[in-house]
């Protein structure tokens, strides 16, 4: 974008560009006599009554008065990835969904309504992968009714920051009173380097035994939790034994699905922190996934888990896209807070849905 020496504005976007990714510069007024400018990049989700609404990669919504624009242009729909496996949002969304299946699901057009008695948001939210087949307000009403019939809050899991993600839907939900309760990211990386680490002492199994569940730091191992944990095309559970008769020193879970290996539920006993046990768990699971033909890895991590994000970056992972859980809050009701890890019905973060291990004081995966 350019601002010409003559002072002429270079705004090359119009309301007809709603839905496209744009880069704009606007003038800011903080009381200083010196003109200052702010740049914003994201999807132009609306342009009404002289106000632009731009949704950034992070899901943040920025309102910009048209009168403050000094430059603007349409930019490519998604930045080129500098490293890591190439993948579309649609591919990763479906792979992640197959790795954490609900107990019950129903389709509304291209929206999958998922329920699992409140165990994790991801298993109790709508995954909108296209058109619901009915007008949006009707679709949202059906969603609210479907979850209300099951005694669950209504959630939609939307994504931002990659080609084909749902910035426009996020804006529509916010305008209709839905609350963005949690934001996390899906990261991808090469699988082979993970398998090069030391994995001595790690045992693998096809199911979660009593010892593994004893280390798992989320909801109790009831039938619903076990069904969700055991779902996926090819599921493996890793364990590093602890003291004799005690809970494991570390655990992890991996789902192999074609070329993808998805890592989750990696937890380490606080007494065994910083001994590389989480890395050993991931190495053992990566080696098994390579043996089944996988070549790429993915995982999910909350945006504010800085320790885990730093480690994943060191292991070669990069952020692919952000995802958000929007919750319907009836008019006049108090917005729920984001509580500790647990079931969706209590406002928790969803357990194995994202990595919270650093905040739990463990040796991060």
Image (cartoon, rainbow, N blue to C red):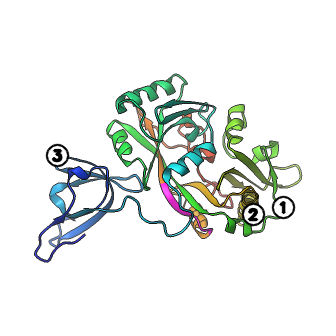
From this viewpoint, which residue is outermost toward the bottom? 5
Q: Residue at x 71, y 64 (%)?
A: 279
On the picture, is 18 further left or further right than 145? left
Asked whether disc 3 touches disc 1, contact meaning CB atoms under 8 Å apart, the reply is no
Q: Quadrant of residue 58?
A: bottom left
Q: Which residue is mark 2?
A: 280
Report the span colored magenta.
315-321
Q: Which residue corresponds to mark 3? A: 49
Quadrant, the N terminus: bottom left
- Residue 308 is situated, as x and y percent measured from the top left of the image, at 59, 61
Q: Residue at x 60, y 55 (%)?
A: 299
Q: Residues within 10 Å of mark 3 (few under 14, many from 20)?
A: few
| Image-based side of 144 in relation to 251, left or right | left
The answer to whether any part of residue 261 appears in the image is no
CA distance separating discs 3 and 1: 64 Å
In the rendered structure, are the residues bearing label 1 and label 2 in contact, judged by CB atoms less than 8 Å apart? yes
Give the number of the disc on residue 201.
1
SS label for mark 1: loop
What distance separates the C-alpha of mark 1 from that of mark 2?
8 Å
- The disc placed on residue 316 is none
The secondary element bearing badge 2 is classed as helix
């Amino acid at each position: 974008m350019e601002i010409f020496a003559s002072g002429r504005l270079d705004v090359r976007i119009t309301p007809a560009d709603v839905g496209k990714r744009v880069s704009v510069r606007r003038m800011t007024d903080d009381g200083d006599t010196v003109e200052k400018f702010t740049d914003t990049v994201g999807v132009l989700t609306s342009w009404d009554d002289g106000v632009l609404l731009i949704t950034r990669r992070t899901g943040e919504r920025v309102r910009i008065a048209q009168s403050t624009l000094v430059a603007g242009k349409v930019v490519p729909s998604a930045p080129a990835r500098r490293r890591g496996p190439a993948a579309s949002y649609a591919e990763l969304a479906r792979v992640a969904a197959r790795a954490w299946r609900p107990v019950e699901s129903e389709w509304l057009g291209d929206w999958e309504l998922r329920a699992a008695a409140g165990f994790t948001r991801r298993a109790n939210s709508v995954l909108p992968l296209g058109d619901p087949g009915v007008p949006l307000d009707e679709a949202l009403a059906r969603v609210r009714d479907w979850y209300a019939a099951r005694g669950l809050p209504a959630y939609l899991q939307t994504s931002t920051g990659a080609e084909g993600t749902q910035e426009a839907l996020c804006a529509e939900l916010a305008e209709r009173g839905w609350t963005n309760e949690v934001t996390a990211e899906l990261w991808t990386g090469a699988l082979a380097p993970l398998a090069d680490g030391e994995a001595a002492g790690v045992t693998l199994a096809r199911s979660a035994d009593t010892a593994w569940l004893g280390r798992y730091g989320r909801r109790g191992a009831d039938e619903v939790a076990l069904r969700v944990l055991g779902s996926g095309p090819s599921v493996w559970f890793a364990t590093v034994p602890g003291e004799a008769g005690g809970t494991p020193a570390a655990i992890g879970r991996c789902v192999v699905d074609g070329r993808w290996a998805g890592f989750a539920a990696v937890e380490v006993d606080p007494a065994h922190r910083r001994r590389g046990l989480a890395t050993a768990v991931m190495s053992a699971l990566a080696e098994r996934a390579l043996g089944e033909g996988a070549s790429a890895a993915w995982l999910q991590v909350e945006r504010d888990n800085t320790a885990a994000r730093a480690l994943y970056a060191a292991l070669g992972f990069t952020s692919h896209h952000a995802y958000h859980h929007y919750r319907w809050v009836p008019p006049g009701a108090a917005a729920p807070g984001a509580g500790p890890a647990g079931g969706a019905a209590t406002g928790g973060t969803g357990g194995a849905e994202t990595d919270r291990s650093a905040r739990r004081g463990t040796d991060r995966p």
